[in-house]
Amino acid sequence: MEIRQNVVMFVGKGGVGKTTMSAATALHFASHGEKTLIISTDPAPSLSDIFGKDVGDRETEITENLYAIELSFDEVLRRWKEKFGPEIYDVISSFFDVDYDIVDYIGGAPGIDEEFMLDYIHGIFREGRYDRIVWDTAPAGHTMRLLNFPSKFIGHLEEASGVYMKAFNYMERVKGLGSKKKKPVFGIIEGWKKLAEETAAFVKDDKTVGYIAVTIPEFLGVSQTKRTIEELKDFGINVKHLIINNVIKKPDCDFHKRRMKMQEKYIRELSEAAPEITEIPMSADEIKGAEKLRAIGRVLFG
Ligand SMILES: Nc1ncnc2c1ncn2[C@@H]1O[C@H](COP(=O)(O)OP(=O)(O)OP(=O)(O)O)[C@@H](O)[C@H]1O
Ligand SMILES: [Mg+2]
């Protein structure tokens, strides 16, 4: 497997090995001298467990060139409010007599946290402090919602601009409110729209963001993986790599022989799902710590 993009995103259903593959990939980049950040946005992050080090919501050094952060949507929302809260208050308070609490209220709108999670990651990419950003996402359904959000947000803002414009014209006429405030407020709305357009373009830019699907060779894994890859394609994203995890390679008992047979069928079914497929053997041991992750990295990257 060869990955050229600066941002690598792992998608797949729950429990198939996204965090394990993300960690192995991040460690691989880091040990080749690339400064790497692994971000987990899973509501139940497990980077701390896998690296055996407390991670949390600040960039934490794991080893040479490797940094990790476990970011909750709450934390992203908090940072978002810090960054945009005053602007939002400006916009709203120019129409209505409201408290600053309005910012919390808006931040609670469905999808806002997703929009700003993407904006946050886009921001880290733009800062250019890292050669690689490896993103360990939440299970697939949530990720699709996440990727879909910027376009919805743009639509909403376009609608909102129209509404605000009418309201302003009305206030100007009826209340004699000057156009002094109009310009900055529209500037702010335009700014948000631009931001959402940039994030929408960012997630679809295949020179920058690479998507890797992870699955297991079992019925549910196969059907959901094909569906996710299709959904991404409809959305304009091509998944080039597929990792089939937990493959039984050397069965030493009847139980495992039967399971291997079962898996073979699903592996065949997956053979057309992506141009490049890598199988990762099921390990008898727990996958924890650098040594085990490096072994997986060797299978992934040769
Ligand atoms: N190839 C493998 N062999 C053996 N165990 C594995 C393998 N890959 C992953 N595991 C184990 O399976 C469990 C689930 O893996 P992981 O946490 O990476 O999945 P995930 O997709 O991130 O899950 P979630 O959706 O819950 O975040 C972990 O305990 C991990 O150690
Ligand atoms: Mg995980």
Image (cartoon, rainbow, N blue to C red):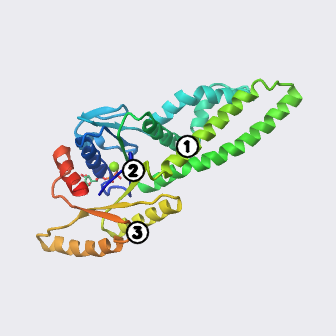
Res. 198 mark: 1
Res. 9 mark: 2
In this orientation, which residue lies closer to the viewer: 129 or 79? 129
Circle nearer the N terminus (1, 2): 2
Tag in front: 2 or 3: 2
CA gap between label 1 and label 2 equals: 18 Å
Q: Residues within 10 Å of mark 1 (few under 14, many from 20)?
A: some
Tell me if the residue at label 3 has its CB under 8 Å from ligand 1: no
Tag in front: 3 or 1: 1
- Residue occupying the far left of the picture: 252
Q: Position of residue 283 (x, y in %)?
A: 18, 58
Tag in front: 1 or 2: 1
Res. 223 mark: 3
- Residue occupying the far right of the picture: 174
Relative to 106, 70 lies left or right: left
In this orientation, which residue lies closer to the viewer: 157 or 218? 157
Q: Do the residues bearing badges 2 and 3 touch, measured as CB atoms within 8 Å?
A: no
